[in-house]
Image (cartoon, rainbow, N blue to C red):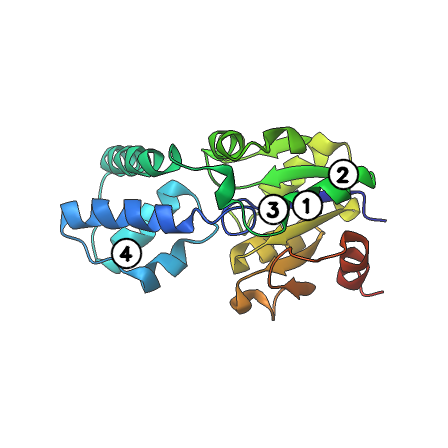
Amino acid sequence: MIRGLIFDLDGVIVDTAKYHFLAWKKLCDQLGFKFDINDNELLKGVSRVRSFEIILDINGQKMSEEKIQKYCTIKNKIYLEYINRLTEDELLPGVKDFMTKARDKGYKTAIGSASKNSLLILERLHIHEMFDAIIDGNKVSNAKPDPEVFVKAAQELGLQNSECIVFEDSVAGIVAAHNGGMKAIGVGNAEVQSYCDYFIKGFSNIDECVLIKKAEGE
């Protein structure tokens, strides 16, 4: 029986992917690296450091760990300039209504995100109090598709992995959920349809109970 709902953040609750892209693009332009919107797709659901390592691979470059950390810090500063302008209007359609109804029906809710800025983003959106647990890049050491972020979220909710269902927009996130023994609902990104247990375009006009039953195969 599903008792917990675990949500990825970027692309599921709010579209901050565009700000990650703009921040990485600005950094890459400064470094003289190639980076476009197609390259950005490879970064979905992975950590900041791993994202920069992918960018280095794309450009056939190598750097010391010290320099990688340096440039990841610069990227994050650029990203935070965008995030600090976030407003509640940037919540994806239907998210707040879906969350409110799910919590009213007794479901526990958590964030399971690679972002180290999750709390700041949730506070800017005025929805941080809607989550019983927030597990992000500050609390995990392994990136998706490792299931650590979702397993820790389930633990903090006081639930078994099998009692939780994950909402994700990346293939790495879907695989991570399955690796943790959880069902996964794909959101928005059509590329995840062949990996997830059920797919929705978004949260508008979605009945949470019906959705969960469909994801469980009932």
Q: Earlier in the sequence, mark 4 or mark 1?
A: 4
Q: Mark number for residue 97?
A: 1
Badge 4 crowding class, 10 Å Cα cut-off, few under 14, some 14 to 19, many 20 or more, is: few
Q: Earlier in the sequence, mark 4 or mark 3?
A: 4
Q: Are marks 4 and 2 in contact (CB under 8 Å)?
A: no
Select label 4 or label 2 by which is in front: 2
Instruction: Name the one closer to the observer, 137 or 82.
Output: 82
The Cα–Cα distance between marks 1 and 2, rounded to whole angstroms, is 10 Å
The Cα–Cα distance between marks 4 and 3, rounded to whole angstroms, is 24 Å
Residue receiving disc 2? 103
Amino acid identity at mark 3: Pro
Q: Earlier in the sequence, mark 1 or mark 3?
A: 1
Amino acid identity at mark 2: Arg
Amino acid identity at mark 4: Asp
- In the figure, is residue 109 to the left or right of 38? right
Residue 57 at what x, y percent from top left?
Answer: 28, 56
Residue 203 at what x, y percent from top left?
Answer: 64, 55
Instruction: Name the one closer to the observer, 99 or 215.
Output: 99
Q: Say which element carries label 3.
A: loop
Residue receiving disc 3? 147
The Cα–Cα distance between marks 1 and 3, rounded to whole angstroms, is 28 Å
Q: Earlier in the sequence, mark 1 or mark 2?
A: 1
Residue 209 at what x, y percent from top left?
Answer: 81, 53
Depicted 30 relative to depicted 210: above or below: above
